[in-house]
Image (spheres, rainbow, N blue to C red):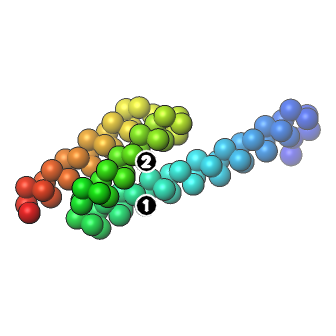
Amino acid sequence: MPILKASKKSVRKDAKRRERNEYYRNALKRALDFARKSNYSEEKVKEAVKIIDKLEAKGILHKNTAARKKSKLMMKFNAARKEA
């Protein structure tokens, strides 16, 4: 356990941030899963891209990670659209 007051506060802040980041990561996983289960429907893909952009803006995802996830999602979306 931390002894200094600042260290105690840091532990509290870290816990709060970890919880918030976990919520956002789960939201992203849910959105990507919904897109996959809907066979990459345009509505679900747009929703997933929107969430990726929000997480990038908040600093939860690195910009290159966000770009990679969007690129992969759009590749699958375009492939599904060609099939149909």
Q: Is residue 30 left or right of residue 39?
A: right
Q: Residues within 10 Å of mark 2 (few under 14, many from 20)?
A: many
Residue 81, compared with residue 1, is above or below; it is below
Asked if the residue at tag 1 contacts the one at tag 2, i.e. Cβ–Cβ closer than 8 Å, the answer is no
Q: Is residue 21 left or right of residue 79?
A: right
Q: Is residue 76 left or right of residue 20?
A: left
Dot 2 or dot 1, earlier in sequence: 1
Q: Please give the name of the residue rendered at 66% of the width and 44% of the height, measured from the top-left corner.
A: 17
Q: Please give the name of the residue rendered at 40% of the width and 58% of the height, measured from the top-left corner.
A: 31
Is 47 in front, or is 58? 47
Query: What kind of element bears circle 1?
Result: helix
Q: Residue furthest left?
A: 83
Is 43 in front, or is 79? 43
Q: What mark, if any, has residue 52 been given in the picture?
A: none
Q: Residues within 10 Å of mark 1 (few under 14, many from 20)?
A: few
* Spot occupied by residue 35 in the image (x, y as percentages of width and height): 31, 60
* Spot occupied by residue 40 in the image (x, y as percentages of width and height): 24, 59
Q: What mark, if any, has residue 30 been given in the picture?
A: 1
Q: Please give the name of the residue rendered at 57% of the width and 52% of the height, measured from the top-left corner.
A: 22
Query: What kind of element bears circle 2?
Result: helix
Q: Nearer the viewer, mark 2 or mark 1?
A: 2
* Spot occupied by residue 12 in the image (x, y as percentages of width and height): 79, 44
Residue marked by disc 2: 51
Residue 61, compared with residue 78, is above or below; it is above
Query: Which amino acid, by three-letter code, is at mark 1?
Result: Arg
Query: Which amino acid, by three-letter code, is at mark 2?
Result: Ile
Cα separation, mark 2 vs mark 1, equals 10 Å
Q: Residue furthest bottom?
A: 37
